[in-house]
Image (cartoon, coloured by chain):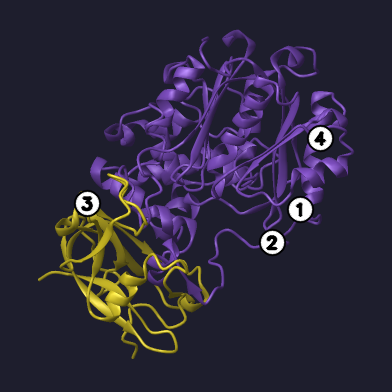
Amino acid sequence: MSNTYLPEGMPIPVPMNDGLDKPYWDGLQGGKLLIQRCGDCGTWQWGPEWICHECNSFNMEWTEVEGEGTIYSWERAWHPVHPALNGHGAYITVLVELPNAGNVRMIGNLLGDPAQEVKIGATVKSVFEKHDGDTPYTLVQWRVAD
Amino acid sequence: MSKRTIRGKTAVAGIGETTYYKHGQSPDPEIVLVLQAILKACEDAGISPKEIDGFASYSNDRNEPTRLAAALGINDLRFSNMNWGGGGGGVAAAVGNAAAAVAVGYADCVVAFRGLAQGQFQRFGRAAPVPTVSGDPAYMSPYGVMSPLQKYAMRAMRFMHENKVDHSVLRAISMASYHHAQNNPRAVMYGRPLSEEKYDDSRWITEPCRLFDCCQENDGAAAVIIVSAEKAKDLKQKPAYILGAAQGSDHRCGAPVMNAANFPSSSFASLAPRLYEMAEVTPKDVDVVQSYENFTIGVMMAVVEHGFCEPEECNEFFQLENLTAPSGKMPLNTSGGNLAECYMHGLGLQIEAVRQIRGDSANQVPGTNVALNIAGPMVHHVSTVIMGSEATL
């Protein structure tokens, strides 16, 4: 029984070759969710970029945030578009807003029954999903809060 | 300084299309398809291919102008243009860029074209078979967000949630395309009508889209020839004047990991007003709309963002009878569009608009003077062109 939401063989995320988002992926491996925040004006920013979109400072910092958010949008994919998903069945992806990080949005899967009703606005909490192997990495997944 | 505009300065003088095939079924290589389409457009316009002096395309088309110019024996290549960005968001931009080049005198006879042979090259609707991903895909692919639909479905899901939109809206958009294709022998779905039951029974691809909400993938090529308004008047066909063209997207539309400021959108919110301003028309003046259907969800939001109905009016506005020629309120995709004619990456829709202006569409809207052509809704760089008859000048 796999401990991951989607089967083995999915594309493996690796940091960008210019190093921009290495702190994010390293943070997840260490059990921390790090999001970009401008060291000058305090604007939260996601996905990663070298410069702050608000004040154009290059002084971007990585700030640990609590893995809690609300479902902003979602989709349920049925048709497999990758060989690893052949025969797997439907799965849910959610777009989660993080109110503690300026409402930036993250993408993840919604853990649990893939047939469940998904409610926009529901509170969700993060779950770190470890992937071992030659290139170990960690994904942030989400589950509906109790 | 006089007002900067391309309004009425150029026109589409020729259109050309190859036979449209299901993906992977073209008997010819992609370059041959492109050359065939260009030659047909020249014949339609009544010009020699040697008169072409510029090329414009989009979505990183593989058929480079230098090769085409050499192959066609063009003497003086004066303009070459590739609109950045993948997907079909650039098709109206390519037409607009060609028009701009002619309007300012860079070139005299520019062809906007697109060729696709997905058997020769990779298909759109499949994820590339790569072991690792980085950058934006690293935040999506490991979660199973890989195909174009999977990348855009959440924009529509949010829009439908905020505006209480029924699935009947998407069904009406799909059925309009299939309805029109039944009168168009060029259409791949000619002779294959779509009923409400067939739509409702079709499988989910990615919610909120079913099979019939998704475009085909096809092989073929298409081309339009753009010349000055003066020259167009002397050529064989009734000119379809370019009244306005606009491209782009609003604030941080391309922000990674779906962080666009205006997320429940098809990316036209800031574009449409400046397009109408240049074209000097309003939505009420538009006789027929061709809107690129990558997916019906994009058409829905694009029609709203171009001002044809309010977001909360979708359920009433998107009724099949409103969307069909000859007498609907807003006849939509009158060739069958990307869903049912051919996915020529949207260039077929530009050609259909020219036919409507000429008055020889298979689903003619009587007395069409203004046609609006939307490209690539929901991608992060989109474009729209408005074409008009001589009466609009």
Question: Which chain does the numbered disc 4 sit on?
Answer: B
Question: Which chain does the numbered disc 3 sit on?
Answer: A
Q: Residue at x 43, y 74 (%)?
A: A14
Label 1 vs 2, first from the N-terminus: 1
Which of the numbered marks, if any, corresponds to residue B40? 4
- Closest to the observer: B324 or A111? A111
Which of the numbered marks, if any, corresponds to residue B121? 2
- Closest to the observer: B237 or B8? B8
Q: Residue at x 73, y 12 (%)?
A: B230
Q: Colour of chain A?
A: yellow
* Foreground: disc 1 or disc 4: 1
Label 4 vs 2, first from the N-terminus: 4
Disc 3 on helix, strand or loop? loop
Q: Residue furthest left?
A: A146
* Foreground: disc 3 or disc 1: 3
Residue marked by disc 1:
B30
Q: In the picture provided, is B371 more to the left or to the right than A64?
A: right
Question: Which chain does the numbered disc 1 sit on?
Answer: B
Q: CA distance from mark 3 to mark 2?
A: 47 Å
Q: Colour of chain B?
A: purple
Q: CA distance from mark 1 to mark 4?
A: 15 Å
Does residue A51 lie above or below B81 as drawn?
below
